[in-house]
Image (spheres, rainbow, N blue to C red):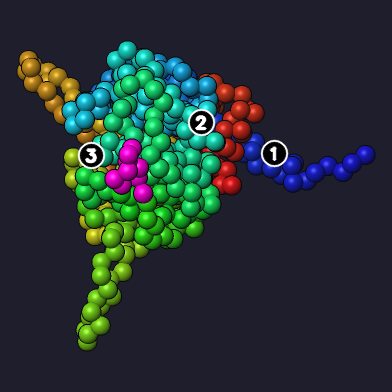
Amino acid sequence: MQPADKSNLLRSEAELLLEKARKDKAARTKDVGSPIEITGKALAIEVRDNVAWIAENTTVVRKLDLETGKTLQLFKGHTAPVTFLTFVDREPGSGKGDLLVTASWDQTIKIWDVQTKEIISSTPAHSDFVKALLVIPALRLLVSSGSDKVIRFWDLSTVTNGQPLTSVGSLTAHTRPVEALEARVTSDRSAIVYTADTMGIIKVWEVKKDDGTPPRWQSTLLEELKHHRTRVNAVIYGNGQLWTASSDETVHVIPHPAPAPAAETQGATTSKPPPPIQHPAAVRALLPLALTPLTEPYILTGAGDVIRAYDVSSPDEPELLSEVDAHWHDVTALRLWMRKSAVEGAPGAVKVEPWIVSASLDGTIRRWRLAELLQPPPPPAIKKEEEKQEEVQEAKPSTGMTEEEERELAKLMEDDD
């Protein structure tokens, strides 16, 4: 008889403890954040007007009314979890974003009509999971990346012709899956593109359109940023700063391009980037409000199942304002929702109020007043023990997946190889 594998026993015990902790927290948080339950798990989300567009592990994109919680449309066509979504204008410069672009573990990129749900085109894009998309509207360029470690460029000038997208360039310099993309346009034929991988490396590229027929996009590696130790989950550029979030439990804000070194004269000081903002868990979601229409000096982060708010008006001394137990599983995305609602007693008047929408692997979308995230109300009084136990039984967490499927999804999402 073979001796029991103690490592498996210990791991199973740890999994049971984690499951119990999540079950308990599901009871405590079942009503916070005005939750909307969805069938699967939200892997990505975008908010437009009062509507959330959700990429789910159930192979669909869900269009959801944030006021009523009702599903307005389901976009069906992928055969594996949908990892990313974004929008592009049918007519360049219209600002309508009337075409939906999605990426999936099925290795394809699909273009959809947002009104009819029609699939306009499907492109076999990568040899492994497609993990990230970036539309650069001014250049009519789509950038994609995935678990195959390749970055690809796609021409959007013929996006409505019904044919697969045309490949106009690629990069193969990364040695790990690439899961975050960002860019800043430098001319009508060039951009700086940031590509971040699961080893913590951020590569900075100058990308230029050549004069060939048909034209292609040529790339030159400018530098590598190595301030993270492992997986980079988010890269956001704005106001001369690069904001990054990582599974190394930090958020960094660095000036980019880096300022020129101070002159080596008496009394000159060397400019240093602000210190990292430390977290107790991997940071998967990042929302710098300074880069939104609010232009406020706050950032919101999702690390584990907690949403944190920081005041970064003094970047060298970021101040933690609040911690909110928002979900019972990892937060995957945070988005600003400029909620528009009718003013009672004033026909035709519309009130606009900033809210935050959070997505999580707990199978819910939650809605928060920004003011309450920055200054949370005091917690409610503790209920009687019997009521607490009853809630725990009633609020058993469920995301519509079997235990084996849960483990497989977690493994695939956290696999750094």
Give whichever of discs 2 and 1 has the lower sequence position: 1
Q: Which residue is mark 1?
A: 12
Q: Which residue is mark 3?
A: 138
Give whichever of discs 1 and 3 has the lower sequence position: 1
Q: Which residue shows up at 36% across the image and 15% down it?
A: 117
Residue 47 percent across, percent down from the top left: 29, 29
Residue 250 percent across, percent down from the top left: 42, 54
C-alpha separation, residue under disc 2 versus residue under disc 1? 33 Å
Give the label, 1 or 3, closer to the camera: 3
Q: Which residue shows up at 24% across the image and 76% down it?
A: 262
Give whichever of discs 2 and 3 has the lower sequence position: 2
- Label 2 sits on what residue type? Gln
Lateral position of residue 410 relative to residue 31, left or right: right
Q: Main secondary structure of the magenta part?
A: loop
Give the label, 2 or 1, closer to the camera: 2
User: Taking the image as drawn, is residue 414 in sight?
Assistant: yes
- Label 3 sits on what residue type? Ala
Callout 3: SS: helix
- Relative to the observer, which residue lies in front, 200 or 51? 200
Asked if marks 2 and 1 touch (Cβ < 8 Å), the reply is: no
Q: Is 385 within the magenta?
A: no
Which span is picked out in magenta?
Answer: 209-218
C-alpha separation, residue under disc 2 versus residue under disc 3? 26 Å
Image quadrant containing the N terminus: top right
Q: Which residue is mark 2?
A: 107
